[in-house]
Amino acid sequence: MSARDFPDGFLWGAATAAHQVEGQNVNSDWWAFEHAAFTAARESSGDGIDHRRRFREDFDLLASLGHNAHRLSVEWARIEPAPGEFSQIELAHYRQVLLALRERGLTSFVTLHHFTLPRWFADRGGWTAPDALDVFARYCAVVMRALGDVADMVCTVNEPQMVALHGYLEGYHPPGVTNPTLWKRVGRTLLEAHHRAVAEVHAASDAPAGLVVQLPLLAPARDDAVTRAFCDEMTAEIVDLYLDGLRPGDGGDWLGVQYYRKNWVDPALPTYFAPPPPGTPVTQMGWAVHPEGLAAMLRRASATGLPLYVTENGIATADDEERVDYLESHLGAVAKVIGEGLDVRGYLHWSAFDNFEWSEGYRPLFGLIAVDRAHGFTRTPKPSAHAFARVARTGRLAALRDTDEETTA
């Protein structure tokens, strides 16, 4: 057998988020957004993929596919259904979820805030409310006191840049605002929310805490001085703000890098982003496939000095062969930077299952495992799931396509 491309102890797994898989999250701002008269959401999340009831069998399936880690979120809207009122039943449920991961040998990455807010918090201004940081810190403290001993790794805030960008500039996510001033203000508030969350994690547990950021590779849509300068400004706002803003002490113990695409910046457009150039390979989301960007953004993230994990990376496609190609090119980018000496310690694919993809609904298929929502939520691992399993078990990129190889670790 040839040498490993990924080191011993590397974490392999996939990711989910509570609202996208659990279903019936009726107390959240997202549920309200999905059902509003005028909304960007194509459909309701409804029953999700019934993961709330099926988590044990889902974790059995993931473990059987070679995963040794799993990223998930706890749902703030369930845990704190009214201001200062915390549900012991919900905390007990998530404790059972985390214990189920531990029993199956899966290292947990527990996200405290993954896009959704309790409806009462959103109604009073959400991240623009004057006491938003105090309220979020209170929630984090309660969760960590209840779950800190069974959480292996803690993700504080998921993609703060995208919460701000989609919700306050593009209007594509709740609260559906298009305000360039609020966009920047909310981004800075969310960075501070990360710092506050790290303090609460450290106060209540020994779990390492980290921010998880989506880092698109940004490029100017045109080769002129104005567009290049604007691209630099957008890079400062979407990438540099969050990486350079990780203060020593409360900046966290590790960093999650989430990468999906290359974006072309155009100051002449209302939301500042142009479609990919003609002929560019794109996903069901219209996102440009550009694996070199993952290597570039991991190199940029390494400047923080923190250990790195790829906490999301994947493709929306109905063609599973295309997913295998995507895995090959993007895992190759991870292997390349590890070979350069970067401290990358794990890769978590987005996503474990086909699930609810926010305003796009159930149409985009990101999962390694298909879910038949019309016929009992039946789970069916795709060929890409088995290909990913071969890499996870061997640490060899070539095993992705080596179907005849014995894939014991």
Image (tube, rainbow, N blue to C red):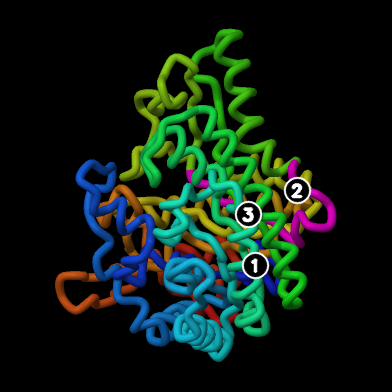
Give percent across and percent down for residue 366: 37, 57
Residue at x 38% of width, y 64% of height: 19
Residue at the (61%, 77%) spot, across then down: 107
| Neighbour tally class for label 3: few under 14, some 14-19, many 20 plus, Cα within 10 Å | many
> In the displayed structure, does residue 304 sit left or right of residue 103?
right
Whether residue 307 sits left or right of residue 45 in the image: it is right
Q: Amino acid under label 3?
A: Leu
Q: Nearer the viewer, mark 3 or mark 2?
A: 3
Relative vertical location of residue 403 with respect to residue 149 in this rendering, above or below: above
Q: Which residue is mark 2?
A: 246
Q: Secondary structure at mark 3?
A: helix
Q: Is residue 387 visible?
A: no
Dot 1 corresponds to which residue? 2
Q: Residue at x 57, y 80 (%)?
A: 106
Kind of residue at disc 1: Ser
- Closer to the camera in the image, 347 or 118: 118
Check residue 208 in the rendering and tell me which mark sits there, or answer none. none
Q: Main secondary structure of the magenta part?
A: loop
Where residue 403 sits in the image (x, y, percent)?
Answer: 42, 70
Q: How many marks?
A: 3
Disc 3: which residue: 133
Judged from the image, the secondary structure of the residue bearing numbered disc 1 is loop
> Within 10 angstroms of label 1, few (less than 14), some, or many (20 or more) residues?
few
Q: Which residues are magenta?
A: 245-260
Distance between the Cα atoms at labels 1 and 3?
Answer: 51 Å
Callout 2, which amino acid? Leu
